Image (cartoon, rainbow, N blue to C red):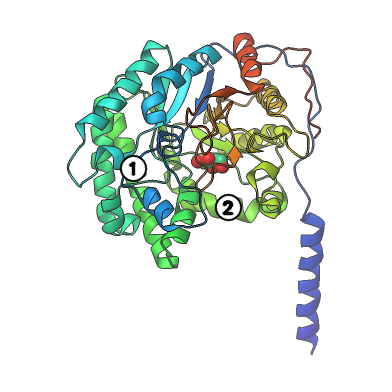
Amino acid sequence: MRIVLKLFAGLLLIFLLLVVCWNWRPASVPVVAVQGPMPAGFIWGVSSSAFQSEGGDVDSNWNRYNDRTPGQDRYGRSVDFRHRYRDDIELARTLGINTYRIGISWARIEPKKGQYDETELAYYDDLILALKQAGIAPLITLDHFTYPGWVLEQGAWSNPQTTADFVAYTRLIAQRYHADVHLWITFNEAAFFMAGEAGARKLGLHGILDMRRNLIRAHRQAYGVIHALDAQARVTSNIVWMGDHLRDAPLRWLTDWMFLDAVEDKCDVIAIDYYASDVVAVLKVGKHWKWPPDPPGLYRALKMLKAQYPGKPLLIAETGMATENGKPREDGIKREDVLRDGVYWTQHAREDGVKVIGYMVWSLTDNFEWGSYTPRFGLYTVNALTDPTLARIPTAAVPAYQQIIRDGGVGADYRPVLAQ
Ligand code: BGC
């Protein structure tokens, strides 16, 4: 009986502690004037992925998932980046950015195992040339949740053969572009890639662990391949920021364990995708356009990452906010304010000793948000489902970003609009 009472008291204590801790997060930071612009060489960029913006009937896992999923928007041409990249690069150039995160679609260039499509390779050659001509450095993502249909047929990432095939693809791309590309992402958000594949391919625990092992090996080998060609290259795999509330910690640990912990020594930079600081709130509201953007949380995230990965440079590889089909948000939050505030807090963190090397906005244009065109993240809006011309319509965040880049950040008189 006494033991039962003790157990009960123990559980009660744990429960009470959990309740108390539920809302705990690092303290707010005083708002102060920023001291100056970002240094020369700071990365100002935009981010995109191949599948989400290129469009077209490519045989990839995601084209197949979309074809078989009735409730989703049809992928179609997406925003046709495949053919409009030169126009989009011109938009990027007028923003003033110095880095453009693009994706290479493995499925596009290797539609059949061992057979490369020269037309599609020529497209990427020209894309990289166009960026160079615009004075913009490319950051290449080798895998952003997609892979060829034949890889799916061989068991996707559950099959160790996929690691070997991915490394061969990486070698091809790195040999082709290493002179012009010095920043690389192997896998976008590997932990989320595993979660997505677990859902789409109905993977059990074994399947997930197999995928984990094969992705880790692939990253480690790809790192070696790229570094053998360019010792100065910076290679990483970006993570999603999982929040800084105490209640977010288990998810943070789990996602770190899934990938980053196992490849940290093979990441020259720690790259984060920052959309919110409160994962529970994000899960609760669900819809992208309801996610609560929290620019001050970016400061806290950068500080926490500095403590977790001392000495490593940090890159904000994606950050932004969504609207619903371009409509004003219900909470009144504006894209240009989130952008200016995000830059303010990044400058602030840098001035407080965080080695943050870049700020990359997701995304230049709206794109296919994994099944839907409704969430709009673009600096330029594109009505993919209703506008046959796919016109790029600037949002108010375009002049805001131009000004920020021109000035190297926000000025000393800038005070954040969004409260902590
Ligand atoms: C992904 C992007 C996605 C964005 C917004 C990131 O986690 O890398 O593919 O579009 O979030 O949801």
Q: Nearer the viewer, residue 118 or 407?
A: 118
Number of the front mark, 2 or 1: 1
Q: Nearer the viewer, residue 373 or 402?
A: 373
Callout 1: 10 Å neighbours few (<14), some, many (20+)?
few
Could you tell whether 170 is left or right of 370 in the image?
Answer: left
Q: Nearer the viewer, residue 419 or 262?
A: 419
Q: Earlier in the sequence, mark 2 or mark 1?
A: 1
In this picture, is 220 found above or below 66?
above
- Measured as percent of width and height from the top left, residue 4 is found at 77, 85
Residue 393: name its quadrant.
top right
Q: Is residue 212 visible?
A: no
Q: Is residue 60 visible?
A: yes
The label number, if any, that marks residue 379 in the structure image: none
Callout 2: 10 Å neighbours few (<14), some, many (20+)?
few
Q: CA distance from mark 2 to mark 1?
A: 38 Å
Could you tell whether 26 is left or right of 218 in the image?
Answer: right
* Badge 2 vs badge 1, beta-carbon distance below 8 Å: no
Image quadrant for the C terminus?
top right
In this picture, is 6 found above or below 77?
below
In this picture, is 386 found above or below 337?
below
In this picture, is 2 found above or below 187?
below
Residue to which mark 1 is pinned? 57
Secondary structure, mark 1, is loop
Residue at (76, 67) in percent of width and height: 14
Residue to which mark 2 is pinned? 253
Q: Name the residue type under label 2.
A: Trp
Q: Nearer the viewer, residue 66 or 38?
A: 66
- Measured as percent of width and height from the top left, residue 36 is found at 68, 11
